[in-house]
Amino acid sequence: MNLIIDIGNTSVKAALVSDGVIVGRERFLSADSEVIGRFTGRRRLDAAIVSSVGSDPAILMTWLGTRAGRVHLLTAESKYPFAVDYGTPGTLGTDRLAAAAGAFYHHPGADLLIIDAGSALTVDLVSGGVYMGGSISPGLAMRFRALHEFTGRLPLVTKRSGFTFPGKTTEDAIAGGVIMGLAYEIIEYIRTFEEKHPNPVTVITGGDGGLITPLTGGKALHYPDLVTEGLNFLLETNV
């Protein structure tokens, strides 16, 4: 049994993987060893991997060393199925590399455009066996909140699929503008990517991936567990 821990900016996701199949998952507010211990219970852990773009996982890593036979902290120096061409690898979020590894796991040999629609929208590229980097912009929740907080009267709208275009209410206009604006942004990324690469595959993951993927007109594949699958793949590779 493998334990996968993904420490993000706003939450911690943990998963148990057996023979490549996710058999349990949970989301927590912090990477506390007591909380993770309750999640794993009395299960025998063969190996564990931690990816963190949030809190320092040093205490958690020490605790995991007492629970799992093999433990790996994912960094830019870990072993990947592709070369990493990035000017500042020390600042590169390992969740981005894990998502790229998950896309590679599903589509080895393809040119990959990896879109993670979460708190932030990250767009990354793997081509010719090399991770090339990508871009970072605000995710849906940030865009909704920015319209509310940086204006005097616009309401705070939450993400939803039931909006009209053109919007007949202010809430509809905001929902359509933010959601479709993000979708059109992604569609343009896909268009330019497909123009430049002979064997293109676009994948979408993240908390808003299920909402955004249908708006791309069939141009992208939705993998909701891409980061977890990538981390499990990298765990097997590194330990």
Image: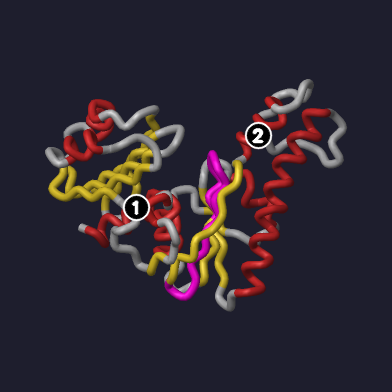
Judge left or right: residue 219 versus residue 39: right
Q: Nearer the viewer, residue 126 or 224?
A: 126
Q: Nearer the viewer, residue 56 or 125?
A: 56
Q: Quadrant of the C terminus?
A: bottom left
Instruction: Looking at this view, name the residue that lies furthest to the top.
Output: 153
Q: Counting residues from the N terminus, which is met first, the one under dot 2 or under dot 1?
A: 2
Element at label 1 = helix
Instruction: Looking at this view, name the residue that lies furthest to the front.
Output: 87
Q: Which residue is mark 2?
A: 159
Q: Which residue is mark 1?
A: 231
Against 67, residue 28 (above or below) is: above
Report the number of numbered marks: 2
Label 1 Cα neighbours within 10 Å, binned few <14 / some 14-19 / many ≥20 = many
Against 199, residue 226 (above or below) is: above
Instruction: Identify which residue is drawn at 15% across, 39% down.
Output: 67
Q: Position of residue 161 (x, y in %)?
A: 69, 38
| Span highlighted in magenta in the image | 115-129
Instruction: Identify which residue is drawn at 24% across, 38% down.
Output: 58
The type of residue carrying mark 1 is Leu
- The kind of secondary structure the magenta stretch mainly shows is strand
Q: Position of residue 156 (x, y in %)?
A: 69, 25
Q: Position of residue 148 (x, y in %)?
A: 71, 26
Question: What separation in Å lies between label 2 and label 1 (alpha carbons)?
Answer: 28 Å
Q: Nearer the viewer, residue 165 or 29?
A: 29
Instruction: Identify which residue is drawn at 60% across, 42% down.
Output: 138
Specify whether residue 47 is painted magenta.
no
Specify whether residue 128 is painted magenta.
yes
Q: Position of residue 190 (x, y in %)?
A: 64, 63
Element at label 2 = loop
